Image (cartoon, rainbow, N blue to C red):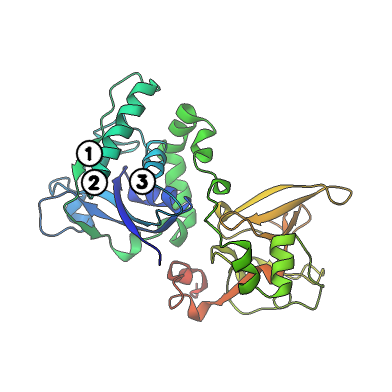
Amino acid sequence: MTLERKATFAGGCFWCIEADFLKLPGVLSVTSGYAGGSAEEARYELVATGHTGHVEAVQLVYDPGQTSYDRLLDWFWRHIDPTDGEGQFVDRGPQYAPVIFHHDEEQRRQAEASLERLKEAGRFRVPIQVDIRPYTGFYPAEDGHQKYCRRSPAHYAHYRAGSGRDNFLKTVWGEETSLVTPAAEFETDAPSEEELRARLTPLQYHVTRKSGTEPPFANEHWNRKEPGIYVDVVSGEPLFASRDKYDSGTGWPSFSRSLEPDNIRTRRDGSLFPPRTEVLAKRSGNHLGHVFPDGPPPTGMRYCMNSAALRFVSAKNLEDEGYGAYCSLFEPD
């Protein structure tokens, strides 16, 4: 039985801090909302006035067997400007102030110790201005704000690029921003090999764990045309969408782009000549297939995947299976 725990952080616009924590292995869910205020009601139009005492925040549910509260704190520091207590980046006002809300005395102790380590590191030349407060409640934000980075990816990317957040993080942390807690560190992030052998079919295990290849034109998804998304057969992480699927003539399911670039990683595969670029699911480490620069416009890429590494979720079942944020992809224009 998984022992799930909660953590609550405020780091400016909740669209961004939510998107950042969604990338962290061991975080089971992220909810955008409002915390810290004295008013009995919290809605966006009220909190936006800056008069309710609430801040835009995210509440995480995490598995302490996969990640720790200290890791969450470390990740938090690396995705905000801890020297700005008057807001965050382009967003100004008390509703955007950075805050750590501790749920118990242990979290308070860890948060204060983490803050001291950050100060002692001397990375910032001006004082840290992040409050550490007792958790007093959380109001989930309106549905339109949940998983906004997935619900409206183009608008989110435009907002984030213009906010100044990423430029600041790159200047302060460089590549450390994305390497604080690489997925490979979490040995419990995927089931054991024994569990996987019992759970997967022989073909699925051969493809995903032994970097195998299934037969072309004789696999489950190569000719599937139904609208929906394709997720990792082990972790369930969203990987590709039917809107980006095309007939490459190879006999394997092919996509012009990934649905969630942060859910995959690539590495050089020198097993054949010339070398290829292998594609893996970031969370589970599963081998998915390879990517080639001979795809259709506008990306010019061909993600040639193995059906055995993917599970298809029909558009009509997205809400029921917990992928409701992707329903808008399949709504009529």
Q: Residue under circle 2?
A: 102
Kind of residue indicated by mark 3: Tyr
| Residue visible at 40% across and 38% down in the picture | 74
Q: Is residue 55 left or right of residue 289?
A: left
Image marks 2 and 1: residues in contact by CB distance under 8 Å: yes
What number is the disc on residue 112? none
Circle 1 is placed at which residue position? 132
The image shows residue 160, relative to residue 120, as above or below, that is: below
Q: Is residue 38 visible?
A: yes
- Tell me which residue sits at (29%, 31%) in the image: 84
**Amino acid tagged 2:** His
Q: CA distance from mark 2 to mark 1?
A: 7 Å
The amino acid sitting under disc 1 is: Ile
Q: Quadrant of the N terminus?
A: bottom left
Q: Dot 2: within a 10 Å radius of its alpha carbon, few (fewer than 14), some, or many (20 or more) residues?
A: many
> Which residue does the numbered mark 3 point to in the structure image?
69
Q: Could you tell which of marks 2 and 1 lies nearer the N-terminus?
A: 2
Query: Where in the figure is residue 153, as x and y percent of width and height?
Result: 48, 56
Question: Of the residues under marks 2 and 3, which one precedes in the sequence?
Answer: 3
Horizontal side of residue 185 vs 46, given as left or right = right
Q: Please state which of residues 327 and 38 is positioned toward the viewer in this rendering.
A: 38
Q: What residue appears at the point 34 percent right and 37 percent down from the top-left corner?
A: 90
Residue in the picture at 82% in, 72% down? 216
Task: Please tell me whether mark 3 sits on a helix, a strand or a loop.
Answer: helix
Q: CA distance from mark 2 to mark 3?
A: 10 Å
Q: Is residue 160 left or right of residue 242?
A: left
Give the SS element for disc 2. strand
Residue 314 coordinates in the image, percent (x, y): 55, 78
Distance from Cα at disc 1 to Cα at disc 3: 14 Å
